[in-house]
Image (spheres, rainbow, N blue to C red):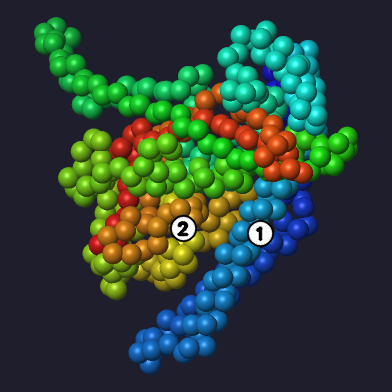
Amino acid sequence: MTVQTAIETKSARALENKAATDPAVNDAMGELQRAFAAFRETNDTRLAEIEGRLGTDVLTEEKLARIDAALDTTRTRLDRLTLDGRRAPLGAEAPPRDAVATEHKAAFDLYVRAGESGGLKRLEEKALSAGSGPDGGYLVPATIEREVLTRLARLSPIRGLATVRTISGGLYKRAVSVTEAASGWVSEAAPRPQTDAPTLSELSFPAMELYAMPAATQTLLDDAVVDLDAWLADEVETTFAEQEGTAFVTGNGVSRPRGVLSYDTVANTAWVPGKLGFVATGAAGAFPTTNPADVLFDLVYALRAGYRQNAGFVMNRRLQSTIRKLKDADGNYLWQPPQTADRTATLLGFPVTEAEAMPDAAANSLSLAFGDFRRGYLVVDRAGLRVLRDPYSAKPYVLFYTTKRVGGGVQDFDAIKLLKFA
């Protein structure tokens, strides 16, 4: 194990232990468990009222809605506390830097604070980089880029589930097999006829430009105590995560990545490569009134066994609120809260990821996805995060035009299935 790997592993373990022992995290976890217990009790009361009086008490419905909202709020707070507990300061327990990395960080710090770009120009000339200030900014130090990508993996729902590739060009191409290679069993002395070769198709994933433009006062930049690396990462992470989260779900592939829901779909019984299979609920914009949970089981088993091992559900919080009320034939709730702070809620035993870009349940909507997103969806990052300093456009503020190149799309159409409310 190298020194750098040892330091990173030690740091990661320390952060996990800190998150696990944080009193605020423990309090939020306990509050979440109590809220779900109250939710179950109130929903059971509501169901009993429906069976006994063919209707529900308005007060019971209002109470259930309040508890449901409290569940969402508590889960959001728990996610934030867990994320903050795992977030290390950029300078804490950092691995040793080589001379070039140290020089790059010092030059970048001087550029951000005072606009002096001479040091960065010399470094990029040494590296034979084509980037320049007027053309598109300067590459940030690797520590900042790594921190931004790490935070994006925690904040951007689909990125956290998908396979991520880093490329040096603007396009990533991948060959996929449309048909399986022929094979068969033979005895030791039997002839072996020539088999048909598999048919290959090429998938392309172009890297699109994503930008953010945080602003700072000159007073902030002049303050030597302020960690500008951490400041820049904090400013761009949320903007990038929101844009990515939407694009990876609904993006049309024009000037942005192609989202999961932008591909052609077909009933899963007639699935063909190049399209995503769906299971219909049998009711427009809703779950069926009789045995509503059955369609979720149908969706799970529409996925082949090899994909189900690492599969999970993706939906928005409003659909999750509806599914919380569903039970199986034995009266057990299908949705269960996380058992520990670093876990997610589960549905039918599979993890649930909340993605606000997923549509609400409506007629013919594809509001629920289930699959192995690690095999099914690919995110492509072009190496390099660039910053261009602009002290003129919004005086007295200094703008930092920050760009990254990212693409995405489905790479295995059999690994993701959709639930269609139709």
Front residue of 34 and 224: 224
Are the residues at dot 1 and dot 2 in contact (C-beta closer than 8 Å)?
Answer: no
Q: In this view, does 291 lie to the left or right of 210?
A: left
Residue at (50% x, 33% y) in the render: 209
Front residue of 253 and 273: 253
Q: Is residue 254 left or right of residue 5?
A: left
Q: In this view, does 97 lie to the left or right of 157?
A: right
Residue at (38% x, 92% y) in the render: 53
Can you give x and y, in whole percent of width and height, for residue 378 in the image? 43, 33
Residue 404 image label? none
Residue at (26% x, 54% y) in the render: 279
Residue 17 visible somewhere in the drawing: no
Give the SS element for disc 2: loop
What residue sits right under mark 2 in the picture?
316
Q: Quadrant of the C terminus?
A: bottom left
What residue sits right under mark 1 in the picture?
77
What's the distance in space between the residues labelled 1 and 2, CA to CA? 17 Å
Mark 2 belongs to which amino acid?
Answer: Asn
Q: Badge 2: few (under 14), some or many (20 or more) residues near its Cα, within 10 Å?
A: some
Q: Residue 367 lies in what quarter of the image?
A: bottom left
Give the SS element for disc 1: helix
Residue 74 visible somewhere in the drawing: yes
Mark 1 belongs to which amino acid?
Answer: Arg
Residue at the far bottom: name it: 53
Q: Badge 1: few (under 14), some or many (20 or more) residues near its Cα, within 10 Å?
A: some
Can you give x and y, in whole percent of width and height, for residue 46 in the image? 46, 83
Residue at (59% x, 26% y) in the render: 136
Can you give x and y, in whole percent of width and height, for residue 2 in the image? 71, 17
Can you give x and y, in whole percent of width and height, for residue 290 in the image? 28, 73
Q: Which mark is first along the chain, 2 or 1?
A: 1
